[in-house]
Image (cartoon, rainbow, N blue to C red):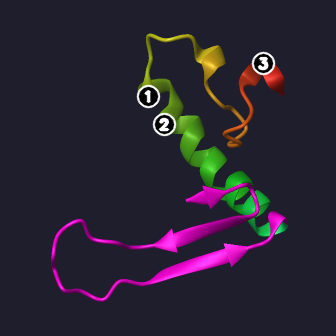
Amino acid sequence: MIIDNELYGVGSDNLYPGHLSEFNYVVEGKKAVEELIEEYWQQVWKYSSPDVFPKLNQDLYCSSGNANQTKNSL
């Protein structure tokens, strides 16, 4: 989860009562979020986005990894 492009959380939460230990990390800093987006999210999105909604207009989708930007606003 990325919040306001200033921090992100990484971890595990089970949706079932498994009574397992769950660990989460919160990472703060715009630079850290930029690195996550560039080195991880953009790579995942590059290969995943064509199959998300293949019949819709691709200009509606974010190409930068920033949810506030679309292809037309870059």
CA separation in Å, label 2 and label 1:
7 Å
Q: Is residue 50 magenta?
A: no
Given the current orientation, which residue lies at the most extreme left position? 17
Question: Could you say which disc has been placed on residue 31 in the image?
Answer: none
CA separation in Å, label 2 and label 3:
19 Å
Q: Nearer the viewer, mark 2 or mark 3?
A: 3
Query: Which mark is first along the chain, 3 or 2?
Result: 2
Q: Is residue 66 left or right of residue 19?
A: right
Instruction: Label 3: state its secondary structure.
Output: helix
Residue pointed to by mark 1:
52
Instruction: Label 2: state its secondary structure.
Output: helix
Q: Could you tell me the amino acid type at mark 2?
A: Ser
Q: Could you tell me the amino acid type at mark 1?
A: Val
Q: Nearer the viewer, residue 16 or 74?
A: 16
Q: Is residue 25 magenta?
A: yes
Q: Nearer the viewer, mark 2 or mark 1?
A: 1
Residue pointed to by mark 2:
48
- Pinpoint residue 57: horizontal percent, then vertical percent: 56, 10
Marks 2 and 1: CB-CB under 8 Å?
Answer: yes
Q: Could you tell me the amino acid type at mark 3?
A: Asn
